[in-house]
Amino acid sequence: MPENYTATVTDKRPGYGRLLRTRGAWTFLLPGFAARQPFAMLTISTVLLVQHTTGSYGTAGAVSATTGVSMALFAPFTGKLADRFGQRDVLVPGVLLHTASVLLLTVLALTDAPLWALFVAAVPTGASTPQIGPMVRARWGVKLQGSPLMTTAAAFESVTDEFTFVLGPLFATALCTGVHPAAGLVTEAALTLVGGLLFAAQRGTQPQPSRTAGEIHARVEHVSALRIPGVRVLIVAFLGIGSVFGGMQVALAAFTESIGEPGLNGVLYGTFAAGNMLSGIVCGAVAWKIAPQRRLLLAYTALAVTASGLWAAQSVLLLAGIGLLVGTCIAPALITGYTLVEKLVPPTARTEAFTWLTGAVALGQAAAVTVAGQLEDRLWDGAGFLVPMGGTVLAVLLLATLRSRLVPPSTGRTVARGIGHRVPVSVD
């Protein structure tokens, strides 16, 4: 058991306090929190700036979606490079490129550049988005390998992600509506630069790169996370979570503008994220007896049911209440998915696996932003809420059909069935 693990063998349910007392954890948690904050600001800041300069939510959604698609496509590649060469060697050039790309996109939008120029600038903006969340999760894996605190760490990271999604949209919306339409993106670039470089400087806690002098056979030992069937199922399922984030961002912005209260956008989205964060705290404190693949299906079913009620909300209070319920269902799905990665994927490919899931959320969000923007432009105010409903229902159908692929590899335990012979059966 790693020396950093301090819980005793008598612990029945290690809690957050014990997790945060893990030696060296705060050296990467604090800069990691600052560096991942911009991720929650990028989409909404882009939508608000481009909508301000073009007057179209469809155009704003398409430009924002381009950043999301680019991030989704390049995130796994970034994770694979980080696994092989080390997080610092990947982060530093990525942070610098992202900062420059965001500033270029901002200038182009403010100077009424042609639409194609905005799309061109959006590609490196998304592709260079630092994958701080997956990198922090990989560092927890190094610190807690083999300990019962891993589930708590997964919950803590989900809560941290959602806390950024409480602060990020509120902060970005306040900057864009109260200071200047470009203030959100400029602040996002500054936070990425400072937080990303500080996080990269913490070399002592990063996972050891697979390309080291003692690993001559690294190419043989390394298995791509994408080759694992359960990871592929999770990737597709996480598109449904992205559809909730993207669809709600556009639909809430359109709804609050239609009632003449654009400032409520950040408040409503913050309420949704707050529900996500609070349920994440609870999930990390529960000693679950239900198998994770079953928990995942239940969480997605609840998410689909609650998301299906968004489009019918006609008042701010009702929308806030339903949004809170939707957010409450997000965290269990995210936490359980990341927990399954720890069981399905070997340590040498976990950063890559985490970035595949993060990229899937971004891709789902990008597609949702695009579709929701078109629905808002062409149909009625609030039509974008149909997107979260559709995305989550499809995810539930997928998980119900392919749940068996999420069962972790057998560790030697078998269950006997029948009389006179034994058939190995994975323990669920």
Image (cartoon, rainbow, N blue to C red):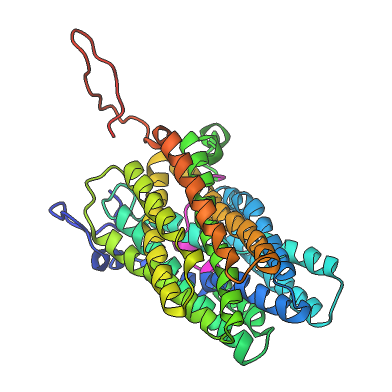
Figure quadrant of residue 340:
top left
Which residue is painted at 41% across and 51% down in the image? 338
In which quadrant will I find the C terminus?
top left
Question: Percent position (x, y) of residue 186?
Answer: 66, 81
Please state which of residues 318 and 139 is positioned toward the viewer in this rendering.
Answer: 318
Label the magenta part by its dominant secondary structure.
loop
Q: Is residue 336 above or below residue 262?
A: above
Residue drawn at x 30%, y 67% is 20
Residue 203 visible here: yes
State the residue lying farthest toward the top: 420
- Residue 249 or 346: which is nearer the viewer? 249
Specify start and end residues of the magenta stretch as a single range.
199-211
The answer to which of 79 and 422 lies nearer the viewer is: 422
Q: Is residue 71 something one can see in this rendering?
A: no
Location of residue 303 with respect to 96 vertically, above or below: above
Q: Is residue 117 magenta?
A: no
Q: Position of residue 303 (x, y in %)?
A: 41, 56
Q: Position of residue 191 (x, y in %)?
A: 58, 78
